[in-house]
Image (cartoon, rainbow, N blue to C red):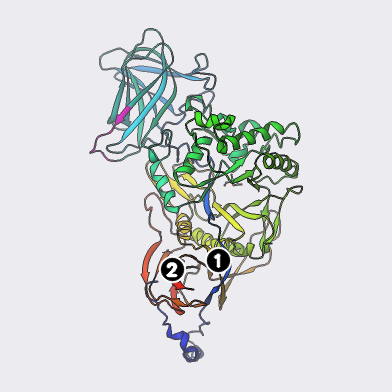
């Protein structure tokens, strides 16, 4: 992209093209090369603003899936800190013993910490001989990360049986080697429940590693009970109970405008009892029981509770898009009947909105202040349910919609039962009330499918509800998408941007995956990590480059000589394959910053060959010849990023020259390109 390989003189001398073409043809007649088709041409009409692009187009969608929070963004390093993961087994906890010391671990319901955490861990140990010790170890979420010069904050509740007074020694230790990286001591343990807090600091010279465990060592003999054993490394913005800095920094690069939470299927759960019951996710972590995330088959600590979601928004300057429970269980229980049965859930939704946005004179606003955040959060969008594709949604939606609009008429309510199709068609189960926004989800299985769907909203009725593409992805690549996925995404995003007068928000899903063995429930996730490192996929960088290079005005464009290729769409479940379809070989879109005049032209080449393209900008008083580009490309479409190669495929910025009212560029094979062109209207 640095130097145009096709001279801009081609624009001025179409005859030259003819001569070249006839020469090539003549050559072809000799049994050599074939005639080249005319170069694709894209014209931007700078005098025609088609609409205004949503300032909050790109955001995040999140839920507890693939160890997104526990073992992911949420900073807690101890797995099963509250012993709720498994009713019959202290999962993730084992006995460590040295020099003949012994110990046994058991879950104990007879000595609860409080009425929220009713099962504690009993540790009976015998380590009275010289050099003996016994301890209990936790291996974290596929390891405990140890870094040099790092301060860890450990805390736990403990109670000792008569006869044992302490001390307890806390340690960060290697799994295989006897190496101890940091220790801290609790000199005495009382016979009634008390909280203990210790700081552990690693030395400067050590290497970073993850094959480690956290150990609580006891000396002598006795019995202790433990609860809420927690270990935090430094967190983003030093928030207590906060988030991993590396993943937050990656997200900050993207500059997402909103966060849709808490799901996804995680909002609903398979049964009423396993929904995201927000009232159980607030307050001190020692009073959070967590719940079975049966939608994704593991226990959630709910350390990432309602207030933590909101603080995550605050840290990255995102607005919350709050999904409230709409009475749908994914399995077994079905849906709550509208009317009296649904009423308590409607009240829960109203209380939740008050917790988020009410001032401290309200009951739930006061509770938020008590939890540490007196200032209300600005809330505009509330989604009712998630993928609620049921006939029963209509009545449930109506009841919840009416209750929220009566109390909060200013809120924009989102229908989660909507589905989009080709040619601007959107269907919904909500009939009696018209939502302000439709949340449509699109997961595709090939780049071509995403490319074919990039025109979906070109013909959508502009007087209809706005569109929220609340979950979407080109699902190519696992655990994280590869360049083919990113190209399908980028082509699709040109359609989202072209229609961003009506498509007001879009969020890829799922956002996170712990790539350790067993961490993934859903392949193709935007950001991958293990206990120690993290990386953005090519799809992540495609979104970041689109979001960070976007104007507020959508400009009219036209294209000529764009090639096409044949694609076989997949058959609907149990159906016959539809007829093959033609998919373009180039995707584009243009926006302009109304303040600076900079045009952002996006060009996606999904082909394995380079493409020479002709560009024209008409309707501008002047076009500067100097400009910039940002290009992300791959040698092979299956190329991807990983923990080992986190930045193999990333956007590369460059200075450009030779821009003008007419100019040419060459797009590299498998490339996503942005040209930043300075213009005056
Ligand atoms: O993103 C994964 C899942 O896909 C979400 O939980 C659900 O809403 C959708 O079906």
Asked whether 648 or 567 is in front, the reply is 648
Q: Position of residue 42 (x, y in %)?
A: 52, 76
Q: Alpha-carbon neighbours of circle 1 within 10 Å: few (<14), some, or many (≥20)?
A: many
Q: Earlier in the sequence, mark 1 or mark 2?
A: 1
Q: Alpha-carbon neighbours of circle 2 within 10 Å: few (<14), some, or many (≥20)?
A: many
Element at badge 2? Answer: strand
Residue 203 colored in magenta in the image = yes
Q: Is residue 595 left or right of residue 532?
A: right
Element at badge 1? Answer: strand
The quarter in which the N terminus is drawn is bottom left
Position of 42 relative to 73 (above/below): below
The answer, for residue 435, to whether it is visible in the render is yes
Using the image, tell me which numbered label, if any, was put on residue 554.
1
Main secondary structure type of the part rendered in magenta: loop
Q: Residue at x 67, y 39 (%)?
A: 407
Position of 80 relative to 264 (above/below): above
Asked whether 459 or 141 is in front, the reply is 459
The stretch of residues the image draws in magenta is 199-207
Using the image, tell me which numbered label, if any, was put on residue 676.
2
Q: Position of residue 508 (x, y in %)?
A: 54, 52
Task: Measure the alpha-carbon separation of dots 1 and 2.
Answer: 14 Å
Please say if the residues under marks 1 and 2 sit with CB atoms less than 8 Å apart: no
The answer, for residue 523, to whether it is visible in the render is no
């Amino acid at each position: 992209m640095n130097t145009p390989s096709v001279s801009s003189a081609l624009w001025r001398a179409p005859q030259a093209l003819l001569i070249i073409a006839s020469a090539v043809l003549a050559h072809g007649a000799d049994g050599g090369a074939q005639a080249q088709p005319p170069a694709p041409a894209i014209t931007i009409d700078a005098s025609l603003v088609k609409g205004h692009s949503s300032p909050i187009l790109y955001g995040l969608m999140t839920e507890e899936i693939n160890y997104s929070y526990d073992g992911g963004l949420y900073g807690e390093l101890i797995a099963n800190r509250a012993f709720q993961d498994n009713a019959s087994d202290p999962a993730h906890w084992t006995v460590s013993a040295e020099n003949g010391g012994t110990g046994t671990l058991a879950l104990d319901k007879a000595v609860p910490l409080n009425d929220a955490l009713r099962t504690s861990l009993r540790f009976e140990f015998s380590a009275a001989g010289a050099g003996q010790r016994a301890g209990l170890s936790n291996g974290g979420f596929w390891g405990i990360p140890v870094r040099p010069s790092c301060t860890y904050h450990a805390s736990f509740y403990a109670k000792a049986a008569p006869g044992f007074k302490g001390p307890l020694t806390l340690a960060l230790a290697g799994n295989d080697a006897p190496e101890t990286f940091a220790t801290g001591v609790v000199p005495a343990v009382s016979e009634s429940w008390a909280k203990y807090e210790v700081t552990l600091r690693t030395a400067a010279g050590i290497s970073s590693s993850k094959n480690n465990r956290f150990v609580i060592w006891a000396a002598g003999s006795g019995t202790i009970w433990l609860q809420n054993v927690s270990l935090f490394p430094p967190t983003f913005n030093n928030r207590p109970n906060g988030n991993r800095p590396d993943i937050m920094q990656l997200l900050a690069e993207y500059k997402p405008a909103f966060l849709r939470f808490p799901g996804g299927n995680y909002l609903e759960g398979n049964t009423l009892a396993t929904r995201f019951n927000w009232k159980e996710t607030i307050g001190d972590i020692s009073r959070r029981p967590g719940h079975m995330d049966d939608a994704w088959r593991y226990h959630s600590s709910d350390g990432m509770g309602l207030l933590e979601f909101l603080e995550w928004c605050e840290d990255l300057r995102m607005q919350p898009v709050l999904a409230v429970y709409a009475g749908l269980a994914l399995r077994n229980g079905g849906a709550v009947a509208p009317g009296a049965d649904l009423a308590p859930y409607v009240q829960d939704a109203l209380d939740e909105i008050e917790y988020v946005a009410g001032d401290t004179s309200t009951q739930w606003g006061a509770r938020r202040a008590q939890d540490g955040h007196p200032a209300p959060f600005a809330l505009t969008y509330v989604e009712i349910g998630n993928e609620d594709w049921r006939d029963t949604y209509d009545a449930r939606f109506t009841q919840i919609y009416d209750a929220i609009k009566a109390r909060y008429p200013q809120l924009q309510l989102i229908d989660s039962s909507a589905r989009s199709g080709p040619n601007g068609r959107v269907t919904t189960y909500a009939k009696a009330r018209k939502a302000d926004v439709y949340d449509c989800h699109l997961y595709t299985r090939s780049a071509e499918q995403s490319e074919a769907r990039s025109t979906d909203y070109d013909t959508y009725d502009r007087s209809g509800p706005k569109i929220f593409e609340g979950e979407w992805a080109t699902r190519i690549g696992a655990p994280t998408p590869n360049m083919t996925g990113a190209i399908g995404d980028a082509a699709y995003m040109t359609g989202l941007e072209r229609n961003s007068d009506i498509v007001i928000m879009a969020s890829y899903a799922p956002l996170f995956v712990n790539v350790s063995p067993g961490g993934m429930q859903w392949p193709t996730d935007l950001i991958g990590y293990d206990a120690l490192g993290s990386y953005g996929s090519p799809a992540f960088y495609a979104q970041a480059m689109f979001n960070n290079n976007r104007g507020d005005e959508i400009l009219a464009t036209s294209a000529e000589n764009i090639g096409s290729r044949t694609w076989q769409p997949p058959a609907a479940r149990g159906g016959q394959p539809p007829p093959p379809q033609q998919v373009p070989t180039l995707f584009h879109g243009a926006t302009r910053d109304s303040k600076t005049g900079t045009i952002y032209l996006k060009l996606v080449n999904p082909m394995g060959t380079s493409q020479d393209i002709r560009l024209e900008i008409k309707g501008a008083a002047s076009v500067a010849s100097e400009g910039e580009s940002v290009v992300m490309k791959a040698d092979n479409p299956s190329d991807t990023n990983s923990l080992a190669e986190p930045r193999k495929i990333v956007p590369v910025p460059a200075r450009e020259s030779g821009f003008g009212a007419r100019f040419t560029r060459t797009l590299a094979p498998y490339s996503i390109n942005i040209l930043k062109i300075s213009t005056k209207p």
